[in-house]
Image: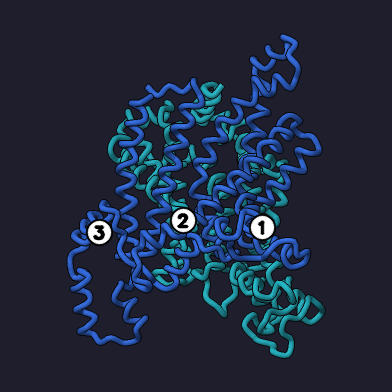
Amino acid sequence: MTTYLGRRLVATLPVLLLVTLTTFLLVSLLPGDVVSAIQAATEGIDVEVAESLRVQFGLDRPLLVRYLQWLTRLAAGDLGRSLLGHQPVLGAIVDRFPVTLLLTAGAVVLSLAIGIPVGLAAGLRPNSAFDRVLSALAAVGVAAPGFWLGILLVFLFAQRLQWLPSFGYRSPVEFGLGAMAAHMLLPWITLATPRTVEVVRQVRSGMAEVMAQEYVRTARAKGLPEHTVVSRHALRNVLIPVVTVTGLSAGHLLSGAVIVETVFLLPGMGTLAVEGVLTRDFPIVQGIVLVGASATILANLLADFAYGILDPRIRYD
Amino acid sequence: MASSIHGSVTTDAARPAVPSAAPSRRSVWQRFLRTKTGPHAAGTLLAIIAASLLAPTLAPHDPLRQHLAHTLEAPGRQFLLGTDDLGRDLFSRLLYGGRVTTLVAFVSVGASVAVGVPAGILSGVVGGRVDVWLMHVANALLSFPSILLAFVIAALIGPSVTVVMLAVAVVFAPRLARFARGQTMVVREALYVEAARAFGVPLGRLMFRHILPNIAAPVLVEASLQVGYAVLVESSMSFLGAGIQPPYPSWGLMIKTGFGYLDSAPWIALIPGLAILVLALAANQLGDALRDTFDPRLRL
């Protein structure tokens, strides 16, 4: 097991390195650089000043040198400074991180809390009316664009029924948990919808498969009551893959967060990224893209490890 | 259990070498028509594509023309689906907006197949270092949250239809590469591949004449499922402001405009959202139907 962990970690290193290279090239190769962004923002510094700024920023040096310099600073935890606010990028991301964490964690909890029981109910009675209605709902749930779903919820619950606020964020520390939850409920539902569909499908098909297994038949033949068969023998085997799928969904969750934060005006990393892109604040964009990819890699790694620990049949060496 | 499924995949994949087992074109078509969702999904997709192509003939108004005396008008006789804040006919904008979404979705997934599938087959056939590094690159690209990556690329280059297609293709190519590699691993050990190798068939011919035809069905299924997701990525990008630029219509942009008028004119946001939903749903269901067609038992 430990050698597996080690090997898995080592295999992540080249991927991480390629992620830093892609992030660097993304901003360096695409048209426009830091200086042209400053030029646009300050409306006309002359060409000589622009050139001296390029020298000052080191933009006259070869690409490889700049990448290595950037990487060295990165290793020291320095992501550079925002072009507009001049604050450190890392600080800006750390400021926005709690909102995104709250949003995504809430959505994961919600998707599991709804998806697991619903998936079990459907899986225990495959092809029942309930199961068929559910699979139709699931098909719609994954095909609906997230931002539209959010807008639909705002229209219904904030504007027509006026049950919930339509946008904004309330910090739980300042305003209390109630106000925070009231503002987060619609964003949570929006982000959780496609995840819930995923969980329901996984649990449903897992349950249908497990219930047809020999050991379930044996358990029944022993005369165990049905709920014991389900909870003792079937459930564990169905739920373990759900852990993995949840870990693997990190990238989707972060993508969704960009959209959901934009719709509900939440001050998270997603809105920071959108602001950064639209104002061409390259260091901010680089920082968020890098943090987003690293978070995804970390979540995938954790999912792998959790799977190994939860399922004793997995022997990695 | 898992191993028995795997076993049957290998034997089935090896089977096309026996002539009698290869299904005729006609029977594949009949099986497709008998799937639950196939005919509906294909019909819906064709209708959307036809409506987009015929937009200039079908649209009752110029999609850019502002009828300033008729702003935010509800759906009615003169404006079938109502008008937006500038008095532009929403039905005409819906038809023209559909061109962008369908074009971007199909072309970008097509481009991802064209790049990703050969890379994936190469990775699977050659193995070794090539395989390791190609998959490192694919995994690195897949680590970026997809919509964020596509959005950053499109916004930094400067959004246009071509750039949006490129950005979406960058997101999807590694998925198809990894998928094609997985399928190649399945058929790689088959006798006909071994035979071709023993005869010294050159690599390119091995990849495209011997392996590609045998993984084409699952790749087609995967690609059509990705079209549904590409529709969502494209519309998300234009919602975020990195897609088609105003005043030209796109569904994501129409929803964005409508978001500001939910109170007074909710249809502006609701209708294009329904259009996206129907298109993505049809693409997903076509994928499911193709899967059932090519093999009802196996999840290819």
Looking at the image, the residue that sits furthest to the top is A222
Q: Identify the colour scheme used.
A: by chain
* Residue at image mark 1: A182
Crowding at label 3, few (<14), some or many (≥20) Cα neighbours within 10 Å?
Answer: some
Assign a secondary structure to mark 1: helix
Q: Does label 1 lie on the same chain as label 3?
A: yes
Q: Is residue A69 left or right of residue B44?
A: left
Colour representing chain B: cyan
* Residue B238, position as x, y percentages in the image: 54, 68
Assign a secondary structure to mark 3: helix
Q: Nearer the viewer, residue B178 or B290?
A: B178
Mark closest to the chain's N terminus, 2 or 3 = 3
Mark closest to the chain's N terminus, 3 or 1 = 3
Quadrant containing the N terminus of chain B is: top right
* Residue A32, position as x, y percentages in the image: 33, 73
Question: Could you tell me how far apart the alpha carbons at marks 2 and 1 are, in whole angstroms?
Answer: 20 Å
Quadrant containing the C terminus of chain B is: top right
Q: Chain of mark 2?
A: A
Q: Amino acid at mark 3?
A: Trp
Q: Amino acid at mark 1?
A: Ala
The mark found on residue A70 in the picture is 3
Crowding at label 1, few (<14), some or many (≥20) Cα neighbours within 10 Å?
Answer: some
The mark found on residue A166 in the picture is none
The mark found on residue A97 in the picture is 2
Q: Amino acid at mark 2?
A: Phe
| Vertical comparison of A294 with A258: above or below | above
Residue found at x 51% / y 63%: A267
Question: Could you tell me how far apart the alpha carbons at marks 3 and 1 are, in whole angstroms?
Answer: 42 Å
**Which of the chains is blue?**
A
Residue found at x 43% / y 53%: A292
